[in-house]
Image (cartoon, rainbow, N blue to C red):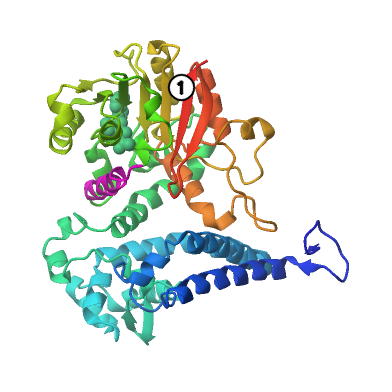
């Protein structure tokens, strides 16, 4: 297909091919990125050098103009490849994803990145990389070569590998000797990437292997993860006990610890207190954090709006930790008895009647529509006309433009990509769709705006506003009793 310079598809001499338009978008993005770096007298980091997050030039990668250019570049480059490449090659290349992830997980468990960090830029022969874990060096070389071909690690000479920018981002930051000495603690207190890769390469691969079977099963109530682990009941897989996980996955508890660490990281950002205007709640008003976990979200809000009274609701053992967290992090509120810790199952009638706001962060994405409606209905039953429901969740964008009914919701409109890119920026926004599939495998769902409107409606709420917070993927999705 050909496009006129600024118009609809045409087939005249003055037209520009889609390939050229995509190449132009890439070129413009590169100009922007180079421009920002040149102004700072720096150069964009090369692929074959290890990633150094403390290098001042790394901060330029977070510059808003660079971020926007990178999004366009990723979207355009992926679309260019998809457009130019033979379609069967493209389809078959999709199957690279699973073995690549499996190889990456193996490399992480064998502490390859840390061994190579200690070896330095000249790299190390695969015999020595394999030696501490006593694995087959020939097989390890084949795995590392597959990864290096996909830009993860650098094969500096035959069978000699070094870290590159991408592989080094998996660094657990500990000496390799320590990692080999205490393998069960290798992920504790480390950066998130290794923990996620190891979890994705284990549970997530196993659960995705059951996706088709689950879809085809006429009685298929089980989540793919539960199917993979042979656990009979339906519902949120995150409620699986550790013993079930251990049946078929290695060190899942360790993975979950690492994930908690990741979430903790997120909780220290201030986005909970932005978005929805918490100052509109009355002084002395009650905020109920439903499924509060550590209560970090309500804590961030209460710190900014200390006139609020907070009720954190969760299961008992979780609340014990939440209490300690609040006592340590916000003793003023705790000592004034402005925060309560209430054991409560959110499927049962809500004990706090007439709260000013119910906050649910990362709760509904763990559950099916049916269960989510039950949770929200319990809150609606206990609400007063002025109660606000605030969900903090990701929103899955439609690939196509949203219909007018959705665009009419305040805050629903999001930036769309210039043609010929897909309106949702294609590959640059693939992570949210992966996340949705992952949540499905765990028994939950990330939702589109239309999905949120639907579950709100069925539970007695009206979705009135969406708050998007710059630089943050999660949105505040606000409802009032219908
Ligand atoms: C994904 S975590 C989110 C925690 C917190 N809102 C946050 O954003 O960090 C889900 C929380 O829901 C709690 N939870 C799960 N099922 C629950 C139920 N039936 N009743 C109350 N809490 C529940 C879990 O214990 C966990 O703390």
Range drawn in magenta:
253-270
Q: Position of residue 187 (x, y in %)?
A: 22, 56
Label 1 belongs to which residue?
A: 373
Q: Residues within 10 Å of mark 1 (few under 14, many from 20)?
A: many
Secondary structure of the residue carrying numbered label 1: helix
Q: Note whether 260 is above or below 464 in the view shown.
A: below
Q: Quadrant of residue 391?
A: top left
Q: Nearer the viewer, residue 235 or 359?
A: 359
Q: Note whether 261 is above or below 24 in the view shown.
A: above
Q: Position of residue 194 (x, y in %)?
A: 29, 59
Q: Note whether 66 is above or below 189 in the view shown.
A: below
Residue at x-position 40% and y-position 24%? 280
- Using the rendered image of the protein, determine whether residue 235 is visible from the camera's viewpoint: no
Q: Is mark 1 within 8 Å of ligand 1?
A: no
Answer left or right for 77 relative to 259.
Answer: right
Q: Position of residue 385 (x, y in %)?
A: 45, 12
Q: Position of residue 379 (x, y in %)?
A: 39, 17
Q: Quadrant of residue 307?
A: top left
Answer left or right for 271 relative to 178.
Answer: right
Residue 258 is inside the magenta segment: yes
Q: Quadrant for ligand 1?
A: top left
Q: Nearer the viewer, residue 57 or 114?
A: 57
- Using the rendered image of the protein, determine whether residue 208 is visible from the camera's viewpoint: yes
Q: How many marks?
A: 1
Residue farthest along the right direction in this orientation: 12
């Amino acid at each position: 297909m050909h496009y006129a310079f600024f118009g609809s598809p045409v087939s005249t001499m003055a037209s520009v091919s889609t390939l050229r338009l995509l190449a132009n978008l890439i070129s413009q993005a590169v100009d922007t990125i180079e421009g920002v770096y040149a102004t700072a007298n720096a150069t964009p980091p090369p692929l074959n050098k290890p990633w150094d997050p403390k290098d001042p030039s790394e901060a330029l990668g977070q510059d808003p103009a660079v971020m926007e250019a990178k999004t366009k570049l990723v979207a355009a480059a992926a679309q260019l490849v998809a457009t130019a490449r033979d379609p069967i090659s493209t389809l078959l290349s999709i199957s690279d994803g699973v073995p690549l992830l499996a190889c990456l997980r193996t490399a992480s468990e064998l502490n390859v990145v840390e061994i190579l960090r200690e070896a330095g830029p000249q790299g190390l022969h695969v015999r020595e990389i394999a030696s501490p874990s006593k694995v087959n060096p020939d097989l390890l070389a084949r795995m590392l070569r597959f990864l290096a071909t996909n830009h993860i690690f650098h094969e500096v000479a035959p069978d000699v590998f070094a870290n590159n920018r991408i592989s080094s981002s998996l660094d657990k930051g500990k000496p390799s000797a320590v990692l080999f000495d205490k393998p069960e603690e290798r992920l504790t207190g480390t950066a998130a990437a290794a923990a996620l890769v190891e979890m994705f390469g284990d549970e997530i691969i196993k659960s995705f292997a059951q996706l088709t079977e689950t879809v085809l099963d006429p009685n298929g109530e089980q989540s793919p993860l539960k199917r993979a682990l042979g656990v009979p009941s339906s519902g949120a897989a995150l409620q699986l006990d550790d013993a079930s996980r251990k049946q078929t996955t290695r060190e899942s508890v360790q993975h979950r610890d690492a994930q908690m660490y990741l979430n903790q990281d997120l909780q220290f950002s201030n986005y909970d207190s932005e978005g929805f205007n918490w100052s509109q709640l009355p002084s002395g008003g009650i905020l109920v954090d439903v499924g509060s976990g550590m209560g970090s979200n309500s804590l961030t809000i209460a710190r900014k709006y200390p006139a609020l009274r907070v009720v954190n609701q969760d299961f008992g053992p979780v609340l014990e930790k939440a209490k300690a967290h609040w006592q340590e992090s916000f003793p003023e509120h705790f000592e004034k008895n402005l925060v309560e810790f209430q054991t409560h199952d959110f499927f049962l009638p809500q004990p706090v009647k007439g709260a000013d706001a119910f906050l649910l962060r990362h709760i509904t994405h763990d559950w099916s529509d049916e269960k989510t409606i039950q949770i929200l209905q319990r809150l609606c039953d206990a609400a007063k006309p002025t109660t606000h429901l605030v969900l903090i969740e990701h929103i899955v964008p439609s690939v196509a433009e949203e219909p007018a009914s959705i665009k009419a919701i305040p805050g629903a409109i999001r930036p769309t990509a210039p043609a010929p890119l897909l309106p949702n920026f294609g590959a640059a926004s693939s992570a949210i769709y992966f996340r949705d599939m992952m949540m499905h495998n765990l028994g939950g769902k990330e939702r589109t705006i239309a999905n949120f409107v639907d579950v709100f409606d069925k539970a007695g709420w009206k979705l009135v506003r969406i708050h998007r917070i710059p630089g943050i993927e999660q949105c505040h999705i606000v409802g009032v009793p219908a």
